[in-house]
Image: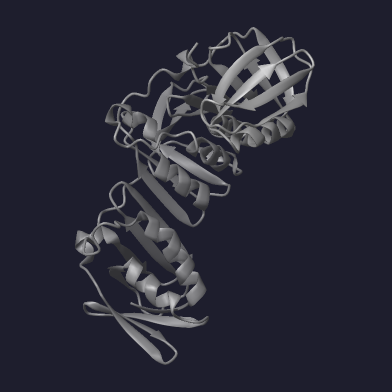
Amino acid sequence: MKFSIAKTQLESALKDLIAFTDKKDASNISAHICLEATSESLIFQANDLEMGLCLTLNIDVQEEGSAVFNAKHLLDILSKLELGDLMLESQENTMLVRFKRSKFKLALLDKAYFPKFPDYAHLPSVHFSDTTLGDHFRKLAQVITTNTANTSKYEFMGVLLVLQENLELVATDTRRLSLAQMEVEGLLEAHTRMEFILPKRAALEIVKLFKGDFEMFYEPKDPTMLFFKNASMVLFAKLISGKYPSYQNVIPTQFIHKIELNTQDFKDAINITHALGTTTKIIFYPDKIEFESLESESPNFASTFIEANTPLDQHIIHAQARYLLDALNALPSPTFELCLNEENAPFVIQKNNFLTVVMPVAQEA
């Protein structure tokens, strides 16, 4: 194997690939990258057995061949070099890297032991033409639980994808739940309901790598993984096993009050009280809404209000300020709908096809 490549092009590819390598044991073959050089392209593979990425660069190759090398070691070398072209050449059990007056040797492993990339070409797929899926993943990632010690809620460590007439995306940490709905291209009309729990880590990599015009391949029966493919790369991710709890039961179907409010005004008010406490007390009046920090959390106190027309008088809810801000930041619109029932009941913040159910913070009488 022998080829020349620009330092920036190789470095960019390796930075994408290294997220899919084993970080715990540098001697493990899954901490390495498999490179195959064909006459007109370089095909890189990284695979830590939970996620994998296959990335293709269109480059003229002087000599075909393959190599399995440590990704971090090569990235460390590239970080010390200035801009320019490198020459990479495999020689028996080493790979020679030449750059101007410098040269480096990297040990190679046997390609026969490198994990096989799963096959996906025979699977059905749906198409995404823009960044909507990634945008939803980014918003939902804030909601996913980070409590890895709670193994009984392991399903909550990922995003639930429900594929039926359209695509529903769900995430929760048991104190709040967010749901997004979106249409997908290429889905059969009489599609049976399918559920996939995609790990948070995989969802964030999709946000970073897939900006639009890509496909998602899925296993229609007993799914164990999902595949995402665009013009230059394929990503696979193993799914979280288990049954996601019935999220429909968490979302209220009826509300006593629905109030249209200004998004930025509401956020600004919450930020003021959030400066002195984690919980915000919100009091609704016919002509205004007051926001207060809780004196039980801190001897300091903050309060403010916004002008608003509401059908309520001294209706009070207590909620985590961060949950409110996350829900509002997920809505790129000047207004939102606040849906309320009794004071201690879950409430909903929603707009268009995105909603968040928030559990109120219980207060001692």
Above or below, 363 against 79 in this view is: above
Q: Quadrant of residue 68?
A: bottom left
Q: Quadrant of residue 39?
A: bottom left
Tell me the quarter of the image containing the N terminus: bottom left
Residue extending farthest to the front is 299
Q: Residue at x 60, y 38 (%)?
A: 275
Q: Is residue 304 visible?
A: yes
Q: Residue at x 29, y 56 (%)?
A: 22
Q: Position of residue 351 (x, y in %)?
A: 66, 26
Using the image as rendered, state which of residue 187 and residue 305 is in the foreground.
305
Position of 173 with respect to 262 (left or right) is left
Q: Is residue 184 visible?
A: no
Numbered label tally: 0
Position of 199 with respect to 213 (left or right) is left
Q: Position of residue 33 (x, y in %)?
A: 32, 63
Q: Quadrant of residue 108?
A: bottom left
Q: Position of residue 322 (x, y in %)?
A: 55, 34
Using the image as rendered, state which of residue 13 and residue 113 is in the foreground.
13
Q: Residue at x 52, y 25 (%)?
A: 296
